[in-house]
Image (spheres, rainbow, N blue to C red):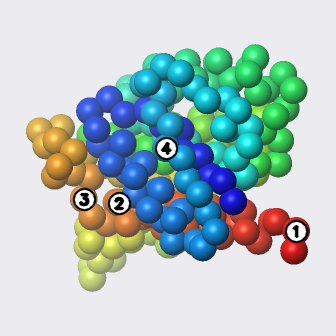
Amino acid sequence: MQISIIYDSGYGHTAKQAQSVAEGVRRVEGTEVRLIPVSEGHIPWEVLEASDAIVFGSPTYSGSPSARFKQFCEDSTKAAWNQMKWRNKVAAGFTNSGAQNGDKLNSLISMALFAAQHGMLWVGLDLKPGNDTSRGSVHDLNRLGSWLGAMAQSNGDQGPDDTPIKSDLETAAYLGQRVAETVRRLQPT
């Protein structure tokens, strides 16, 4: 199984989250994962077409995915959408912002809609919200309470060596593993 993670990262925080998604993918035997940062400019469209799943990632800036990620989405029209090259591939998404909320849900909705327009099958989190009781903590998986994808929060005065915190990275890894397991279940035996 080939799973690609295509993402943007302005300051390194979302790249760290992408690496955690890849770590989760690798937990499933027989998977290969490819990290593709959109910031490098060249998009290997043939790799995305050959992938069984594509996981999308972007920081949330001003309540939506980054401009570079949006440019990738626009460029996919000619490269993939016109011929529906990603139809029936598994898709998922993750995002990071400086604020606890930061309108990250809007970024995930944008990614899910983008995947739907390509005829992809969206996989969200099957985790109940963490940190939502008096006994909960920021160390819980899915501490930000997302169903649509993995969310992370990074303090604006800390670099990617310090944030996102471990529970956000573990949530991203959980998403990567879930995507790989879903692809495995959907493959013919």
| Residue at the spot of label 3 | 165
Q: CA distance from mark 4 to mark 3?
A: 21 Å
Residue for badge 1:
188
User: What percent of the width, then of the height, locates residue 106?
Assistant: 51, 37
Q: Is residue 120 left or right of residue 64?
A: right
Mark 1 and mark 3: Cα distance apart in space:
38 Å
Which numbered disc flags the more N-terminal residue, 4 or 3? 4
Q: Earlier in the sequence, mark 2 or mark 1?
A: 2
Q: Is 30 on the left or on the right of 147, as rendered?
A: right
Q: Assess disc 3: are there few (<14), some (14-19) or many (≥20) residues with their C-alpha within 10 Å of its C-alpha.
A: some
Callout 3, which amino acid?
A: Ile
Q: Secondary structure at mark 2?
A: helix
Label 4 sits on residue: 35
Figure quadrant of the N terminus: bottom right
Camera-side mark, 2 or 1? 1
Q: Position of residue 129 (x, y in %)?
A: 44, 69
Residue at figure coordinates x 46%, y 56% from the top left:
21
Q: Observer-nearest residue: 115 or 184?
A: 184
